[in-house]
Amino acid sequence: MYAQTSLLRRGALFIAGYSFVEFFLSQSMECFLAAHRHALEYFGGATRRAMHDNLKSAVLERIPSQAPTFNPRLSGFCRSLRLQAGGL
C-alpha cells in the first residue's frame, strides 16, 4: 500500500524541446538546487541563463518594471556555474 502522495511534487526543466523531470518528497531549497544540478548533468552542460517564473524558491520579490530579487542561494548556485539568473 502506498502512503499518501500529496507531498510529491513534479519539477521539470525544458530546454529547446527537451525536458527533464525529477521527483522529490520535499520542496526544500536543497532539493530545488539538486534538481537543477541533476538536470544540467543529464543534459551534459549548462545554459548561459537560468530562467525562472515567480516560484517562491527562486524569486523573493518582483516589482513591476524592475529586475526580480532572487533567492541568494539560487543566485550563488547560478554564479558558481557562471549562469545568469533571469525571470520570465
Image: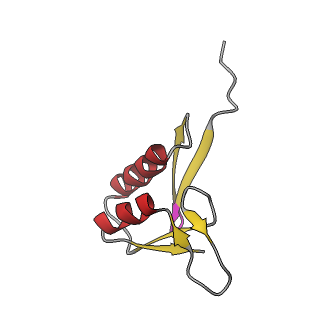
Which of the 4 image quarters holds residue 57?
bottom right
Would you say the magenta stretch is mainly helix, strand or loop? strand
Q: Quadrant of the C terminus?
A: bottom right
Residue 80, magenta (yes or no): no
Task: Give the image location of residue 83, x and y in percent.
Answer: 36, 71
Residue furthest top in the image: 1
So how many labels did they put on this image?
Answer: 0
Q: Nearer the viewer, residue 5 or 41?
A: 5
Compared with 3, 68 (above or below) is below
Magenta residue check for 15? yes
Q: Residue at x 45, y 49 (%)?
A: 35
Q: Residue at x 61, y 57 (%)?
A: 56
The N terminus - image quarter = top right
Q: Position of residue 53 (x, y in %)?
A: 61, 67
Q: Is residue 11 above or below residue 7?
A: below
What is the span of residues highlighted in magenta in the rendered image?
A: 14-18
Q: Residue at x 52, y 43 (%)?
A: 28
| Residue 25, image x, y percentages | 55, 34
Q: Is residue 45 left or right of residue 32?
A: left
Q: From the viewer's side, name the closer residue of 13 and 82.
A: 82
Q: Note whether 21 is above or below 16 in the view shown.
A: above
In the image, residue 45 lies at what x, y percent?
31, 63
The scheme the figure's colours follow is secondary structure
**Picture quarter containing residue 46?**
bottom left
Is 2 in front, or is 20?
Answer: 2
Which residue occupies the foreground of this view, 11 or 19?
11
Give left or right: position of 3 versus 86: right
Residue displayed at 49% across by 62% down: 71
